[in-house]
Image (cartoon, rainbow, N blue to C red):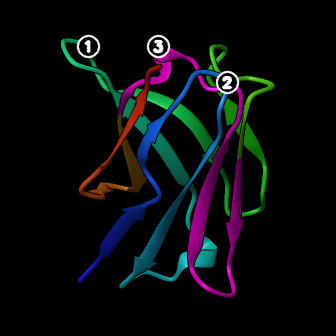
C-alpha cells in the first residue's frame, strides 16, 4: 500500500520560510519521480516543483528562485524548501508520486 505523508505546513508571515516534507512508503522510492502540487481556494491544482529519480528538477515560474525541491533516497523523503513566501503562495500543498497523492498540508502566508 502506497502512502505519502506530508508535514511542515503552517502559518507564516510574508517573507518567511517553511520546509515541507513528504515521507513515502510502499514504493521503491529511488526509482520514482516525485512532485509537489498546490491548490488554492477556487483554483485548480497546479504543479509547484518536480524532481526526477535522477535528481533533475523543474519549477513553476511563480516559485523559481524561491522554492527548492530535494530528495533523500536513504529515508524515502522529498522536501520543498520555501523561502520569501508571499500571500499568493497560500494553498494546500500535496505530494505526488505516479497516481498517488498525499493528504495535503496547509500553508498560509499572512501578516
81 within the magenta span = yes
In the image shown, does 16 or 103 lie closer to the viewer?
A: 16
The residue carrying mark 2 is: 15
Q: Is residue 78 magenta?
A: yes
Tell me the distance, in whole angstroms, between the alpha carbons under discs 1 and 2: 23 Å
The residue segment tinted magenta is: 69-91
Relative to 42, 30 lies left or right:
right
**Earlier sequence position, callout 1 versus callout 2:** 2
- Residue receiving disc 3: 88
Q: Mark 1 and 2 residues: CB-CB less than 8 Å, in contact?
A: no
Give coordinates of residue 6: x percent, y percent.
39, 62
Q: Position of residue 84 (x, y in %)?
A: 70, 26
**Residue drawn at x 57%, y 18% as measured from the top left:** 86
Q: Is residue 10 left or right of residue 1?
A: right
Q: Point out the image quarter for the N terminus.
A: bottom left
Label pair 3/1, CB-CB below 8 angstroms: no
Q: Position of residue 77 (x, y in %)?
A: 57, 72
Q: Which mark is residue 43?
A: 1
Amino acid at each position: 500500500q502506497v502512502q505519502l505523508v506530508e508535514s511542515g505546513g503552517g502559518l507564516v508571515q510574508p517573507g518567511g520560510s517553511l520546509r515541507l516534507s513528504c515521507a513515502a512508503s510502499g514504493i521503491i522510492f529511488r526509482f520514482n519521480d516525485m512532485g509537489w502540487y498546490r491548490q488554492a481556494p477556487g483554483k485548480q491544482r497546479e504543479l509547484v516543483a518536480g524532481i526526477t529519480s535522477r535528481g533533475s528538477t523543474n519549477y513553476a515560474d511563480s516559485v523559481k528562485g524561491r522554492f527548492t525541491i530535494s530528495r533523500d533516497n536513504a529515508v524515502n523523503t522529498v522536501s520543498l524548501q520555501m523561502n520569501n513566501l508571499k500571500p499568493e503562495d497560500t494553498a494546500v500543498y500535496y505530494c505526488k508520486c505516479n497516481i498517488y497523492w498525499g493528504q495535503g498540508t496547509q500553508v498560509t502566508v499572512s501578516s
